[in-house]
C-alpha cells in the first residue's frame, strides 16, 4: 500500500506506547489520524502532539471492549473524513491478578480489550474498506501469541488475535478483496502496559490485587520492558509491513526462535516445557526459587 497525504489511519490505544508511535509514524507520512483511547488525559496530549505534524486529527474516547463504542468510532471517522485507509487495532492491557484463584473479572477485562477489541475493530471498519476500494488492517498481538508463558489470560488473548488475523487474511485472499492484513508480534517494548490497570473499568468492581507470584515475575518483566525496544522502531516496522503487504511483523527475532523451538516440541509430542533462558529475563531457575519463597514454600 502506498501512503498518500490525505489518507486516513485509525489507531486504538493511541494515547501511549506503540499506539502513539503508530500515530506519529502515519502522521509523518501525511495521513490524517483518528486517535482512540480510553484514557482521556493521554488522548488529549497525544492529539496535540500528532497535530504538530500538520495533519488533521479526530480524537475519541473509546473502550474497545464495547462494540457500540467502536462502531461509533467508525461512524465518526467516516463522517469526518469520508474514508478510512488503515486501521490499527492496537489497544491492549496486561493482567496483574491471579488467573486461577483470583476474580474472573481479570479474564473478562483482558479478553474484552485484547481480543474483543480487535474483533470489534475489524467488524466496524471492514465493510467500509471493502465497499470503498480497500485498505489495510493491523492487529497488535504479541510474541505471547505464538509462545505462551507470560500470563495465562494475556497469552490466551494474544493467541486469539493471531488466529483472528490469520483467518481474516485468508478470507480476504480467497475472496479477492483488496484489504491487506498484518499481525504485529513484538517482545519487550518500552510501554506502560504493566500499569494498564490504571484504566480498570469501574463497572467491573474492585481492581484485582496483585498476587505474590506475579509480583516476582513482574519485577523482572518491568526491567525487561524498560530496557526494551522503543515504540518508534516498532511503528516503523509496521509501516514497512503495510507498504509491502506483509502479514507477519516480528520486531524481536530472538523471541521468534523460542516459538519455533516450541513448535518442534509439539511436532515431537513432547510435553510443554518453559525455556530456561528467555530474552531479557534471568534464568528460570532463579525466578522459580523467588516465586516459591513468595508463596512460603521451601526451595526445590
Image (cartoon, rainbow, N blue to C red):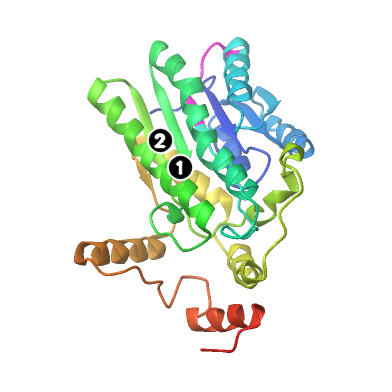
Q: Mark 2 points at which residue?
A: 242
In the image, residue 145 above or below residue 83: below
Q: Where is residue 287 in the image (x, y as percent from the top left)?
A: 55, 79
Give whichever of 77, 208 is nearer the camera: 208
- SS state under label 1: helix
Is the residue marked by circle 2 packed among few (<14), some (14-19), or many (20+) residues within 10 Å? Answer: many
Residue 253 - label: none
The magenta-colored residue range is: 81-87
* Quadrant position of the N terminus in the picture: top left
Q: In this view, does 245 lie to the left or right of 152?
A: left
Q: How many marks?
A: 2
Q: Is residue 219 left or right of residue 125?
A: right
Q: Position of residue 186 (x, y in %)?
A: 47, 53
Residue 65 in magenta?
no
Q: Position of residue 128 (x, y in %)?
A: 46, 15
In the current view of this chain or complex, which residue is farthest to the front? 101
Whether label 1 touches label 2, CB < 8 Å: yes
- SS state under label 2: helix
Is the residue marked by circle 1 packed among few (<14), some (14-19), or many (20+) residues within 10 Å? Answer: many
Q: Position of residue 94 (x, y in %)?
A: 60, 52
- The quarter of the displayed image where residue 248 is located: top left
Residue ID at (50%, 49%): 234
Residue ID at (64%, 23%): 69
Q: Mark 1 points at which residue?
A: 238
In the image, residue 273 above or below residue 78: below
Amino acid at each position: 500500500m502506498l501512503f498518500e497525504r490525505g489518507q486516513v489511519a485509525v489507531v486504538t490505544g493511541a494515547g501511549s506506547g506503540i499506539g502513539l508511535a503508530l500515530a506519529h509514524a502515519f502522521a509523518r507520512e501525511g495521513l490524517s489520524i483518528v486517535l482512540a483511547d480510553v484514557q482521556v488525559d493521554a488522548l488529549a496530549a497525544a492529539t496535540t502532539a500528532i497535530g504538530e505534524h500538520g495533519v488533521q486529527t479526530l480524537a475519541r474516547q473509546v473502550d474497545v471492549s464495547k462494540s457500540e463504542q467502536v462502531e461509533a468510532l467508525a461512524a465518526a471517522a467516516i463522517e469526518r473524513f469520508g474514508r478510512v485507509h488503515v486501521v490499527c487495532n492496537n489497544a491492549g492491557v496486561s493482567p496483574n491478578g491471579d488467573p486461577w484463584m483470583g476474580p474472573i473479572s481479570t479474564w473478562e477485562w483482558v479478553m474484552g480489550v485484547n481480543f474483543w477489541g480487535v474483533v470489534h475493530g475489524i467488524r466496524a471498519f471492514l465493510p467500509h474498506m471493502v465497499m470503498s476500494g480497500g485498505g489495510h488492517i493491523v492487529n497488535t498481538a504479541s510474541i505471547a501469541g505464538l509462545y505462551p508463558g507470560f500470563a495465562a489470560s494475556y497469552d490466551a488473548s494474544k493467541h486469539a488475535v493471531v488466529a483472528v488475523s490469520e483467518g481474516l487474511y485468508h478470507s480476504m485472499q480467497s475472496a479477492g478483496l483488496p484489504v491487506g492484513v498484518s499481525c504485529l508480534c513484538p517482545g519487550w517494548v518500552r510501554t506502560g502496559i504493566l500499569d494498564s490497570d490504571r484504566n480498570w473499568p469501574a463497572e467491573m468492581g474492585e481492581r484485582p490485587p496483585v498476587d505474590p507470584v506475579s509480583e516476582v515475575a513482574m519485577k523482572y518483566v518491568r526491567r525487561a520492558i524498560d530496557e526494551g525496544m522503543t515504540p518508534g522502531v516498532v511503528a516503523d516496522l509496521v509501516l514497512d509491513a503495510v507498504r509491502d503487504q506483509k502479514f507477519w511483523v516480528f520486531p524481536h527475532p530472538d523471541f521468534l526462535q523460542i516459538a519455533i523451538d516450541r513448535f518442534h516440541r509439539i511436532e515431537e509430542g513432547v510435553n510443554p516445557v518453559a525455556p530456561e533462558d528467555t530474552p531479557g529475563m534471568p534464568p528460570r531457575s532463579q525466578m522459580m526459587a523467588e516465586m516459591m519463597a513468595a508463596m512460603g514454600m521451601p526451595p526445590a
